[in-house]
Amino acid sequence: MSKLTAATVKNAKPGPKSRKLTDGGGLYLLVDTKGSKFWRYDYRFAGKRKTLAVGVFPDISLKEAREAHYEAKKQIQKGIDPGQVRKVERQTRNLAASDSFEAIGREWFNQIMDDKSESYRVRTGRILEKDLYPYVGNRPIAEISAPELLATLRRIESRGAVDIAHRARQTAGQVFRYAIITGRAERDPTADLKGALKSKKKKHHAAITEPADVGRLLVAIDNFQGTAVVKAALQLSALLFQRPGEIRAMEWGEINWDAKRWELPAEKMKMGLPHMVPLSRQAVDILLDLQRLTGRGRFVFPSARGASRHICENAVRVALRAMGYTNEQMTAHGFRAMARTLLDEVLGFRPDWIEHQLAHAVKDPNGRAYNRTSHLEGRKEMLQGWADYLDDLSNQQRRQALT
């Protein structure tokens, strides 16, 4: 029987049935009905007939197929099953792929990020896809060194994105620690990079803190011509001064009407601790009005695109721009700085009450974290005093407008 030639292999045409073109010694080219060509080697090992998939033509040429055939025959002579060798090689490749930084990063993201805010998920996903996966994604996570990771972070720094470089280091550290917990890495190299990056620029959220200006802002909110949902979000941002993401994701099930409190579970809080926000009379009135519109759904501030989602992170920001406030004058986060400044400097409330109400980490005299009910009566008094003060400021501006 004559052996195959390169021309014969190249010119082999499909037929009504799959057919074999033999090259001798059990090696043959299988041509299927669609014209695809596969190299196969039929052999016997331990009394059983087996077939080894050598490769696909033209990726594997006739010469390369014969070389693979020769190596497989030598393995059989040594008592080694070439099919088992191929299986182990494939498992090793799959294992390496599953232990890559990208594979573990995607697993971590799917396991851990479900309960995080939409904005945080998007920002973290962008860092992984744009800044980390292209450079260390295919590397076995246990083999990534601190200098290698630093080189990746330096790329981000070099385009002037210092804050993103720090976030990328933090995100990479979370992936490494997940790999450690799941037994696929022994240490987190990001710990060795502390101080290796340029210092982050201190970012201050623009805020209005002059009482007269605050009054004008409140009048502008009262006159806001947008949707009732966004208007209520603006009003409660001022009254409750919680983080914008917490305001947006407020749920009706979190409102304790009897106690007049908004009770946030730990998983929704940045510090990972449950939080209570006393509701002033003004806040309760706003919620009662809004309940008529959105009370049948889950979210207090549902998205216009569907009640299954809350309003997006840009809703309050766009509303402020529509009222004439630039990003340098006021932001959604600025309501927190506004309250913090005026509660302390004008109204004279205790700084620890203010910090606790901002859901910052506050320690008692023994260094322990306060629980969610700490100073609750004092904070209730503070939130009502704050709401009354805001009413006074807006009323002053209205009176001035009439004179």
Image: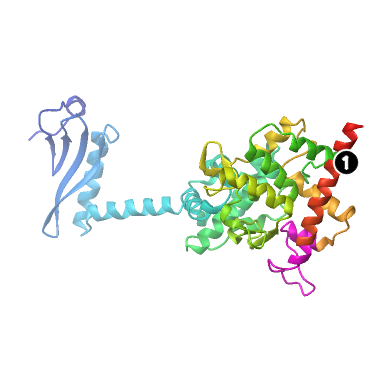
Residue at the image position 66 percent from the left and 43 percent from the top: 164
Question: Which residue occupies the foreground of this view, 332 or 9?
Answer: 332
From the top left corner, tell me how far across and down residue 87 is, in percent.
28, 53
Question: What amino acid is found at the position of numbered circle 1 in the picture?
Answer: Gln
Mark yes or no: residue 127 visible.
no
Q: How is the image coloured?
A: rainbow
Where, quadrant-wise, is the N terminus in this rendering?
A: top left
Magenta stretch mostly in which secondary structure? loop
Q: Within the magenta stretch, is there residue 376?
A: yes
| Side of 86 where 202 appears, left or right | right
Disc 1 secondary structure class? helix
Tell me where residue 92 sits by quadrant.
bottom left
Where, quadrant-wise, is the C terminus in this rendering?
A: top right
Question: Which residue occupies the foreground of this view, 30 or 249?
Answer: 249
| Neighbours of disc 1 within 10 Å: few (<14), some (14-19), many (20+) | some
Q: Within the magenta stretch, is there residue 360?
A: yes
Residue at the image position 20 percent from the left and 60 percent from the top: 79
User: Residue farthest to the left?
Assistant: 1
From the top left corner, tell me how far across and down residue 10 is, in percent.
21, 26
Residue at the image position 22 percent from the left and 58 percent from the top: 78
From the top left corner, tell me how far across and down residue 55 is, in percent.
26, 40
From the top left corner, tell me how far across and down residue 124 is, in percent.
58, 46
Mark yes or no: residue 42 visible.
yes
Question: Which residue occupies the foreground of this view, 193 or 209?
Answer: 209
> Taking 176 as reference, is 400 above or below it?
above
Q: Which residue is mark 1?
A: 396
Residues shaded magenta: 353-379
Question: Which residue occupies the foreground of this view, 260 or 75?
Answer: 260
User: Residue farthest to the right?
Assistant: 403
